[in-house]
Image (cartoon, rainbow, N blue to C red):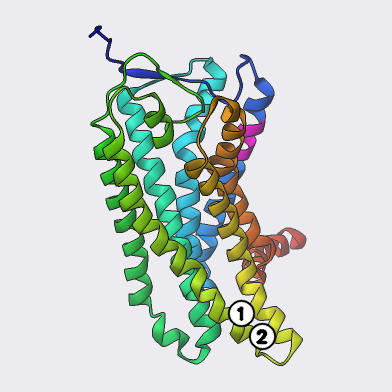
Amino acid sequence: MRNLTKITGFLLIGLSNYPNNFHLLFIFFFIYLLTVITNFLIIIFVFTDSQLHTPMYFFLGNLAFIDVSYSSVTAPKMLRDLVTNNHLISLPACTTQVFFFIYLASAELFLLSVMSYDRYVAICHPLRYTQIMSWAVCTQMASGVWVLAFIYSLVQTLFTLKLTFCGQNIIHNFFCDLPHLFQISCTDIFLNILVSLVVGGSFGIGAFAITFVPYIRILSTVLRIRTNHGKLKAFSTCTSHLTVVFIFYGSIIFIYFVPTTSNLFTLNRVVSVIYAIINPLLNPLIYSIRNKDLKDSVKRAVYPYMRKHDHR
């Protein structure tokens, strides 16, 4: 057998095969900055405005925290690479990125399931909503989201540490993720694939069921509402959540279930940008545009300053 040099670092191709893409630097710096600002604003409004101290906005605040953290796992490294044109990443840094990327992505997956259950209780059991969704229950649900995501990410990362890399060290994307490492590993990845299918499949199917099954009951309940105004009001509380869910699940299906071939490298990078960079910005925008309570919270925060300025 021929000797193979063990690889301790990787070359990230990034967003483009061409250097000096300053227009990409400007675009994605602006997107990342806007992501951080919008998500932090939602967190501030949710936790400072007493009228937003409800389970729905408690979970929305958690989602905003996940989004800003999730984006920060990949965006700063990508921006630095665009500035320095140095796309190298060490094996420990790559593994760390994999851990936090999976951790936060799975946390968002589980949180969207919890938010779906919250909408189910609010619409199908409105009179018992405050009793069922007590603060103790909400805290336990949120804690469960973070703990389950940590366990899942830890299991995946520990099995990833058993992989060795020798020869191919090029990752055709701007960040490290499991499919990229599986593709260039020179050791048998059967056990890794098995763990991903069994553990990931169990968590994924459970999250999928909890997310979408309640909407069957929600839909039947909404259709029984006699007034059009009542139907629109009920639907409006769900459309934002469903929009975020469909975008998130669509990206996941493409990234993890469509084989990554040389013909799909460019498309895979485009979907990865949507999945890792655009989604964390879209989520707060989607919830803000259609949400009257958040708009009112912004008005309550801004109005005193505007009034003070007018008096001057």
Q: Label 1 amino acid?
A: Leu
Residue 106, relative to residue 19: is it above or below? below
- Given residues 168 and 112, the one toward you in this image is 168
Which residues are drawn in magenta? 27-32
Q: Label 2 amino acid?
A: Leu
Residue where numbered disc 2 is placed: 223
Report the quarter where the N terminus lies.
top left
SS label for mark 2: helix
- Locate residue 11: give its quadrant: top left
- Locate residue 207: give its quadrant: bottom left
Q: Do the numbered discs 1 and 2 sit on residues whose CB atoms are within 8 Å?
A: yes
Q: Residues within 10 Å of mark 2 (few under 14, many from 20)?
A: some
Farthest top residue? 2
- Given residues 224 and 139, the one toward you in this image is 224
Q: Is residue 194 magenta?
A: no
* Residue found at x 27% / y 28%: 163
Q: Which mark is residue 114?
A: none
Residue where numbered disc 1 is placed: 219
Report the quarter where the C terminus lies.
bottom right
Q: Picture coordinates of residue 2 (x, y %)?
A: 25, 6
Residue 28, relative to residue 117: is it above or below? above
